[in-house]
Image (tube, grey):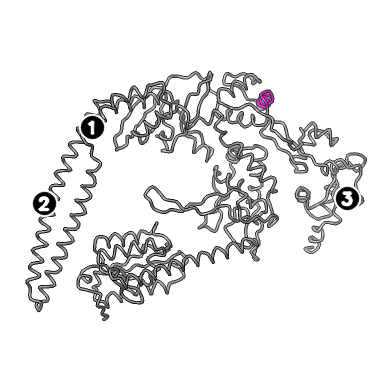
């Protein structure tokens, strides 16, 4: 048995708390010895005369860092029980197990001091209400915080040093793996590398992430993903984020990068500290090492992809489609889909220089390529919500609500009065029990101990009642006074005039609406829309809105609108019309497109006219122009594009090709004669002992030299097999 003068009977009458924590999941799995030592504190508590029933073990925070109390449910439970005077002592192997920052540590010490709770570690027992013990505990807390700071600094310096050399290992994106020497190589699974290559290729052909997504879905192709906790790849249905992450990852360029994100600390709505990852601008990345590992695309191609994706993002405020926050839609940010529960977005249909809102649920469509959930015209919906709001704030409606509120307040007053009576009785019982305890002879320990326990229970009951009463009284602070009620009635008469005043902006109406409405759920069925208004406070109002019939000839498919929006970034109205005609597209009335019809469509949907970019742009050629330069037919140009001999982009099917030809390309593809020993494709494959397709793949990846002879008996593709390393490698295996 152990004895300590600081441990009094009042402490033994309370519970002993054993707080157990490991900082990381790895420590939980590997550092078993530390856990055992912490659980042995149960025996120490018994040696200090605590019964088994009075010993409470809190191990909810295994795998949680002690740098902050955020997310540590076990620590929160411990603090709550200390505040309720349930804890007589807290056992911890070390002070650092409780907290590693002074804010949380001193908060716990203050609480323990007020509630007469002891703290014990491997060095002994401490009383936080004692100056000397508190001084010692404060020093231990400061040293623990300093230790944590030093550990973090050393760890970060080590990580940064390894990253600067490109040696820091991290989770690789799909398509890469580590070899036995920890070098990054392309995945050995050809299916994986093929789908990654196809994703980049199709993006350059189509020009949008959604376009790539739709292509993969139409072809019933699966996409590889790997969760952090899984070792094997999962082949799943493609979705928007997976493709967007692939296109936006610089590692696919063969570049090693570190510091793309940084941890930012902030406060949540409850005032607790939280951490989040914030993306850094490219110029702020800590480490960029080019040519670090095999690439899928070049660095220039990666930069081009990011610019194209940025262009496809919502246009700036000056353009009509950005009228989201400033527009007339009253339910901006409040409308939710009654089918799937997601937040509905606001788009605007422009007609005769006016913008009309409609609410659309397109999150699932955007992310997973499925049809839109629902789209609802906004004018009649907004009018119905506006009428409901003005009805709710009318004097008659407010009178009913205030009368109900008064009844609730009366019930609260009666409940408070009952609690006050209970408190008086509890205080009397505590006083009576104390007098009985004080009158008992000290030698009669059994009776004295029983009376002391009863006295403590009475005090605890009285304290709990005081807390409940204080909470009730705090609720009374939010009650309306008579003057406030009169002011509400006065405002109720003025709100309709304010709402309908020409000087009241759309933003002002939205602010008024958000003061009363929490959510508006929309469910469309045929031409009827059920509007479920959830008011702040919990009340619900249901309304049925009948939508007018809309002539189909006025509807243009959303896919076509988005296609025109993309094309307008590079082509004028006449060119767009020609592209749509080549694709076999028709207007909503079944007519062929013209420049005039494209201009009307742009105006209706707020799509800006194409403007030639300022500054010098890279010289590109159409397929016909490239054929003239290279002295071949246009079909040959298309074959070379598919084979990868020349580089080019086609925004969508039917759009003009933008072909980039360098001087080296022209020289290589317009040769007059082939050097001695350069062979045709079939002979080169035979010479190397591989298939023709393999030779073509080596040619595209520039692992084999090639030229195209335009005249004479040697006309056609000629390949250099004499100096290739592949021939040497193949001879080894033979």
Q: Position of residue 632 (x, y in %)?
A: 84, 35
Pointer 2 or 3: first along the chain = 2
Q: Position of residue 315 (x, y in %)?
A: 57, 33
* Residue at the spot 86% in from the left edge and 35% down from the top edge: 631
Q: Main secondary structure of the magenta part?
A: helix
Find disc 2 in the rendering and name its residue: 421
Question: Where is the N terminus found, in terms of image quarters?
Answer: bottom left
Residue 579: in magenta span: yes
Pointer 1 or 3: first along the chain = 1
Q: Residues within 10 Å of mark 3 (few under 14, many from 20)?
A: some
Dot 1: what SS? helix
* Residue at the spot 66% in from the left edge and 52% down from the top edge: 190
Q: Nearer the viewer, residue 40 or 696?
A: 40
Q: Residues within 10 Å of mark 2 (few under 14, many from 20)?
A: few
Q: Nearer the viewer, residue 447 or 296?
A: 447
Q: CA distance from mark 2 to mark 1?
A: 31 Å
Find disc 1 in the rendering and name its residue: 485
**Circle 1 or circle 3, nearest the eye:** 1
**Circle 2 or circle 3, nearest the eye:** 2
Question: Taking 278 as reference, is 602 above or below it?
Answer: above
Find disc 3 in the rendering and name its residue: 678
Name the quadrant containing residue 723: bottom right
Dot 2: what SS? helix
Q: Position of residue 609 (x, y in %)?
A: 63, 26
Q: Residues within 10 Å of mark 1 (few under 14, many from 20)?
A: some
Position of 506 with respect to 408 (left or right) is right
Q: How many marks?
A: 3
Residue 220: in magenta span: no
Q: CA distance from mark 2 to mark 3?
A: 106 Å
Look at the image and give the residue range highlighted in magenta.
Answer: 572-582
Badges 1 and 3: C-beta atoms under 8 Å apart? no
């Amino acid at each position: 048995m152990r004895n300590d003068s600081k441990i009094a009977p009042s402490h033994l009458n309370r519970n002993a708390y054993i707080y157990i924590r490991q900082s990381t999941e790895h420590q939980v799995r590997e550092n078993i010895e530390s856990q055992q030592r912490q659980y042995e504190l149960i025996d120490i508590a018994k040696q200090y005369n605590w019964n088994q029933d009075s010993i409470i073990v809190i191990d909810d925070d295994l795998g949680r860092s002690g740098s902050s109390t955020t997310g540590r449910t076990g620590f929160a439970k411990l603090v709550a029980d200390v505040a309720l005077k349930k804890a007589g002592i807290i056992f911890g192997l070390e002070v650092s197990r409780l907290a590693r920052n002074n804010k949380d540590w001193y908060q716990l010490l203050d609480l323990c001091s007020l509630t007469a709770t002891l703290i014990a570690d491997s060095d002994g027992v401490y009383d936080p209400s004692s100056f000397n013990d508190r001084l010692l505990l404060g020093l231990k807390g400061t040293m623990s915080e300093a230790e944590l700071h030093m550990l973090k600094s050393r760890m970060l310096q080590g990580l940064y040093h390894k990253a600067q050399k490109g040696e820091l290992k991290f989770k690789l994106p799909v398509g890469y793996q580590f070899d036995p020497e920890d070098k990054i190589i392309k995945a050995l699974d050809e299916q994986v590398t093929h789908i990654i290559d196809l994703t980049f290729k199709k993006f350059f052909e189509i020009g949008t992430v959604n376009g790539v997504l739709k292509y993969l879905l139409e072809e019933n192709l699966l996409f590889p993903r790997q969760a952090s906790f899984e070792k094997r790849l999962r082949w799943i249905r493609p979705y928007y984020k997976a493709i967007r992450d692939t296109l936006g990852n610089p590692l696919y360029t063969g570049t090693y990068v570190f510091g793309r994100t940084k941890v930012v600390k902030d406060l949540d709505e409850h005032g607790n500290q939280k951490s989040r990852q914030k993306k850094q601008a490219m110029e702020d990345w800590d480490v960029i090492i080019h040519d670090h590992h095999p690439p899928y695309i070049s660095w220039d191609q990666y930069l081009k992809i990011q610019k194209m994706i940025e262009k496809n993002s919502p246009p700036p405020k000056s353009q009509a489609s950005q009228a989201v926050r400033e527009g007339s839609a009253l339910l901006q940010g409040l409308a939710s889909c009654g089918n799937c529960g997601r937040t509905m977005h606001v788009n605007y249909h422009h007609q005769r220089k006016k913008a009309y809102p409609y609410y659309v649920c397109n999150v699932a469509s955007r992310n997973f390529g499925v049809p839109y959930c629902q789209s609802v015209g906004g004018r009649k919906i907004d009018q119905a919500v506006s009428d409901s709001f003005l009805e709710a704030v009318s004097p008659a409606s407010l009178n009913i609500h205030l009368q109900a509120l008064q009844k609730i307040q009366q019930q609260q007053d009666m409940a408070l009065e009952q609690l006050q009576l209970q408190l008086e009785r509890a205080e009397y019982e505590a006083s009576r029990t104390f007098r009985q305890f004080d009158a008992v002879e000290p030698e009669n320990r059994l009776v004295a101990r029983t009376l002391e326990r009863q006295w403590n229970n009475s005090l605890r009951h009285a304290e709990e009642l005081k807390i409940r009463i204080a909470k009730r009284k705090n609720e009374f602070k939010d009650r309306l006074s008579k003057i406030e009620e009169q002011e509400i009635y006065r405002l109720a008469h003025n709100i309709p005039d304010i709402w309908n005043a020409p000087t009241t902006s759309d933003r002002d109406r939205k602010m008024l609406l958000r003061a009363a409405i929490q959510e508006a759920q929309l469910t469309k069925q045929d031409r009827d829309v059920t509007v479920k208004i959830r008011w702040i406070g919990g009340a619900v109002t249901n309304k049925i809105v009948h939508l007018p019939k809309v002539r189909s000839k006025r509807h243009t498919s959303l896919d076509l609108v988005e296609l025109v929006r993309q094309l307008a970034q590079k082509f004028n109205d006449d060119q767009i019309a020609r592209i749509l005609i080549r694709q076999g597209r028709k207007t909503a009335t079944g007519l062929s497109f013209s420049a005039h019809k494209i201009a009307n469509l742009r105006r209706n949907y707020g799509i800006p006219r194409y403007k030639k970019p300022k500054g010098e742009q890279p010289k590109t050629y159409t397929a016909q122009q490239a054929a003239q330069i290279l002295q071949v037919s246009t079909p040959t140009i298309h074959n070379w594009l598919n084979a990868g001999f020349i580089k080019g982009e086609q925004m969508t099917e039917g759009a003009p090709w933008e072909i980039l030809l360098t001087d080296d390309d022209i020289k290589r593809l317009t040769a007059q004669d082939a050097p001695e020993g350069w062979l045709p494709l079939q002979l080169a494959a035979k010479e190397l002992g591989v298939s023709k397709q393999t030779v073509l793949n080596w040619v595209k990846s520039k692992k084999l030299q090639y030229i195209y002879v335009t005249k004479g008996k040697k006309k056609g593709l000629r390949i250099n097999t004499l100096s290739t390393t592949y021939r040497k490698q193949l001879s080894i295996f033979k």
